[in-house]
Image (cartoon, rainbow, N blue to C red):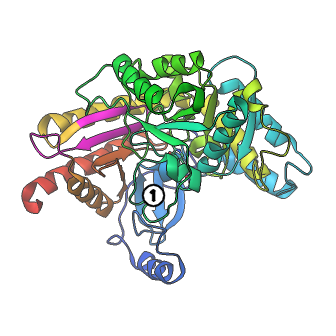
Amino acid sequence: MTTLDVPTTIEQRRLLVTPLPGPRSRELMSRKQAAVAAGVGTTMPVFAARAAGGIVVDVDGNHLVDLGSGIAVTTVGNSAPRVVEAVQEQVAAFTHTCFMITPYEGYVAVAEALNRLTPGDHEKRTALFNSGAEAVENAVKIARAHAGRQAVVVFDHAYHGRTNLTMAMTAKSMPYKHGFGPFASEVYRAPLSYPFRDGGLDGETAAVRAIDVIEKQVGADNLAAVVIEPIQGEGGFIEPAPGFLPRLAAWCRDHGVVFVADEVQTGFARTGDLFACDREGVVPDLIVTAKGIAGGLPLSAVTGRAEIMDAAHAGGLGGTYGGNPLACAAALAAIETIEAEGLVDRAREIEALMLDRLRALQARDPRVGEVRGRGAMIAVELVETGTDVPDPALAKAVAAAAHQQGVIVLTCGTHGNVLRFLPPLSISDELLRDGLDVLDAAFSATTAGAR
Ligand SMILES: *Cc1c(COP(=O)(O)O)cnc(C)c1O
C-alpha cells in the first residue's frame, strides 16, 4: 500500500446538503453568464470552494467525489500539502522576475528533474512554458529548427490544444475548431491504432498502415515531426495496440523525423507509469508535459535530446511567464510527492479497482462496448446495444445522473460517447468505490424508461 498525505481538514465523504446546483452556485452561475464569454463552457454548474484528497467542496457545502482532477491536473491531489508549502514559501520570496531577464534556481531544478525522469538516459534539455498547447507549439518549432523540414504528422482523434497551430493538429471540429479557421498549414493526419474500432488490427500492422500514408502523402524528406499522444486523451482514451508506438518511433529514427510524445494528459504517474511511453520502453526524441506536472499551477515543458532542443537559436524560445517561479516550486513539490508517496503504484491500484468494477458493469450492460485505459486514466466507450454505433446520448445521460448525485465525471471521444475517469491519486479506495456505485446506479436508471 502507498501512504497518502491528504489534508484532513476536508472530510473524505460524499455529502449532499442541497440539490445540485445549490442556491449559491445558481447565483454564481447567473453572474458567470452575465460576465464570462459564452465560449467558455461548464461541465457541472457547481462552484468550487475547497478541495483535497478525492473531494471537491462546493460553495453550498456539498462534498463531491472527484473523478476528473480538473482534467488530469491534480494528480497529486488538490492543494497537496507539499505543493501548498512550497508555493507559500515561494510567493513570499518573489513572484516573478522573468527567467529570461534574471533567472532563478527553481526553473533549472525543474529542468534537471524532467531530464532525469523522462524516458531515455541520453543527454537532455528542457524548456518551460505555461500551457499544454504552448508546449506542443514549441515542440514543433524546435523539431522544425532541428530537421530543417516543415511537415508535421498527427493522428485521427488527436487533441493537442486550442491555439492556432494546435487547432490544426487537433482532429475534432466541434467544438475545438468550428468557425475558427484558417488553420496552420503543413499539418497532415495519419490513421491511428484503435483496437475497438479497427477490428483488433495488431499494433505492427496498424503502424505500417500509418507509415504508408505518411510516406505516400507527405514523404519522409518533408517531415519534421510525428506528434502523438501515447494514450489519446480528449479523443477517447484510445490506447494503441502494443507494438504501434515502438514501430512508429523506429520509423522516425530511421528517417531523421523527430518523434514527439504529447504526454500532457498521460504524464506524471497518471497511467501507472511515470510516463505512458515507459510501458513499451518507447524513448521519444521530445516529450511534452503539462497538466499533472505542478499540482494545479500552470506549467508545461518540452524535454528532449540535447542536440534537438539546442537547435533553436537563443531568444527563439521562451515567453514572459514561462516557468513562473510559483509553478516551478509547485512542480518540484509535486514530483517529490509522486516519488515519496509511491503514486505510480497507487495509480496501478486504482486501475485494478476500477477495471474490476467497470468490467462487471460491462458484463451485465451490453451498452458498455469497451472498458479500457491504464492506471488512473480509465474509460468506458458506450454503444447502442448489439452494435458498435457510438451512443453519445447515453454518455451524456449517465454523466448527468452522476453529476446529480455529486460525482464529477467527464465525457470525451470524437463521438462524445466515452465516459472517462481521471481521479486524483490521493483518492481513497472507499471514495472511489462510492463514485463507482453512483455510476452503476446511473447506468441502471438510464436503462429503465429514460431511453
Ligand atoms: C489538455 C491537452 C493539451 C492542451 O493543454 P492546455 O494546457 O489545455 O493547453 C494538449 N495535449 C493533450 C494530450 C492534452 O490532453
Q: Quadrant of residue 75?
A: top right
Q: Quadrant of the C terminus?
A: bottom left
Q: Which residue is mark 1?
A: 176
Is residue 273 visible in this depiction of the protein?
A: no
Question: Does residue 119 sit above or below 382 in this rendering?
Answer: above
Question: Does residue 107 sit above or below 217 in this rendering?
Answer: below
Q: Left or right: 401 with respect to 284?
A: left
Q: Quadrant of residue 300?
A: top right
Q: Left or right: 24 with respect to 289?
A: left
Residue located 78% across and 37% down the image: 312
Q: Nearer the viewer, residue 33 or 249?
A: 249
Q: Secondary structure at mark 1?
A: loop
Q: Amino acid at mark 1?
A: Tyr
Is residue 111 visible in this depiction of the protein?
A: yes
* Residue 325 x/y as whole percent: 79, 50
Mark 1 CB within 8 Å of ligand 1: no
Q: Left or right: 340 with respect to 193?
A: right
* Residue 141 x/y as whole percent: 68, 41
* Residue 306 x/y as whole percent: 76, 25
Q: Tell how many labels.
A: 1
Q: Quadrant of residue 20?
A: bottom left
Question: Does residue 430 sit above or below 29 in this rendering?
Answer: above
Residue located 21% across and 47% down the image: 390
Magenta stretch? 370-389
> Residue 34: within the magenta?
no
Question: Does residue 427 sit above or below 276 in this rendering?
Answer: below
> Residue 382: within the magenta?
yes
Classed neighbour count for the residue bearing mark 1: other residues with Cα under 10 Å, few (<14), some (14–19), many (≥20): some
